[in-house]
Amino acid sequence: MKFKRFQRIPLWRLIGPAVVIAAIFWAGPAKVWAVLSSADFRLVFAAIALAIPLALIKGIRWKILLHSYDIGLTFCDSTGMYATGMVLSAVTPGRVGDLVKIVLLIKKGCSTGKAIACNILDRLFDVTFVLLAGYVGIWYFSGHFTSQLHIINIIVVIVLALFVIVALKRNFIKKLAVKLIPIQYRPAARECWNEIISSFWKNRMSRILLLILWTVVFWLVQFSAIYLCGLALGLDISFIYISACAAVATVFSLLPITVAGVGTRDMVFILLLGQIGISQEQSLGLSTLVLAVFLVNCVVFYLISVIFKSN
């Protein structure tokens, strides 16, 4: 039975792990281990410690977003709920595990439409920031992404055009989308659409700006953790450069061929850090250390979810 279940796993989900294994053997496992063993663990622990403010920041933003829908969760409840989503999103392709927050909201008595709308908007803030940061990062490294940049620019123009169309013809888009959705899901889809278009965007602009601010703060702390990992390995990289690398890597980690950015992050680091003289084994060492910190952070997020739920 277990073998049959394994056979059902799409092979494309193994692309990321296969890439990183091949890269480590190409660079030399002993060399990569030598880089990791030289790490300053005081800085590594400092990077791990940032998991606590990361969870608290997301809990604050989640509470603000829920409050805009008159969902009155306490700070402990909102932080515990979000920490649970962070753990599950970390171990699922495309971070789909984050959708657990919908289930948790419904259990709290929230309507399905509101729960879905809150989760979509929450992801929208993060994805928008990551895509913008990644786009800026690709422009920063435009000399290495010349052919890809043309394609990305076309995609950006198409996306912006679609946003304009949705804004101007939202009633038509709503009717078209509803027809494409199976009948049993249409009531929830209509409610979700109304909650996003009619309810949230009629909120005070100050609240939306506050959500944007906390989003920026979260990602700055996230990039700081990666910067500390670079310092721990003795790599001479500026905060701006490594943040640009991390932003580009985060965009590629959204692809469903990887879990927790395994493989895609390694390739981005090898490509971009190599341009400033960082060796392949050092790039892989940094990527591996970032992954290790990330996995430890998942344990921290889990503990936070348990502690805050108990309170």
Image (spheres, helix red, strand yellow):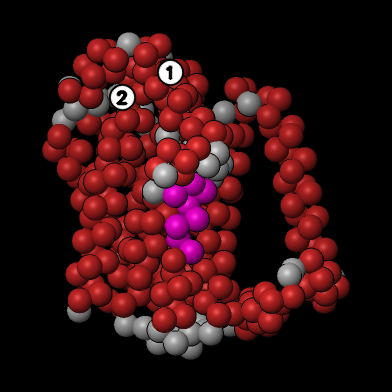
Residue beneath the point at 42% across and 44% down:
1
Sequence-wise, the earlier of marks 2 and 1 is 1
Which of these two is toward me, 216 or 284? 284
Q: Which contiguous range is marked in magenta?
A: 92-99
> Is 268 left or right of 21, judged from the image as shown?
right
> Is 154 left or right of 264, judged from the image as shown?
right
Quarter of the picture containing the C terminus is: bottom left
Name the residue carrying label 2.
285
Which of these two is toward me, 268 or 93? 93
Could you tell me residue 237's position as x and y percent? 36, 28
Question: In this figure, what is the number of numbered marks?
Answer: 2
In the figure, 153 relative to 26: above or below?
Answer: below
Residue 57 visible: no
Disc 1 is placed on an element classified as: helix
> Is 170 left or right of 55, judged from the image as shown?
right
Overall secondary structure of the magenta section: helix
Looking at the rendered structure, which numbered label has been put on residue 22? 1
Frontmost of labels 2 and 1 is 1
Residue beneath the point at 17% across and 43% down:
45
Tell me the kind of residue under disc 1. Answer: Ala
Kindly indicate the quadrant of the structure image that contains residue 180: bottom right
Q: Residues within 10 Å of mark 1 (few under 14, many from 20)?
A: few
In the figure, 75 relative to 82: above or below?
Answer: below
Residue beneath the point at 48% across and 72% down:
102
Disc 2 is placed on an element classified as: helix
Spatial CA span between label 2 and label 1: 14 Å
In the figure, 129 relative to 243: above or below?
Answer: below
Could you tell me residue 159's position as x and y percent? 74, 52
Could you tell me residue 247's position as x and y percent? 49, 41
- Asked if the magenta segment contains residue 97, the reply would be yes
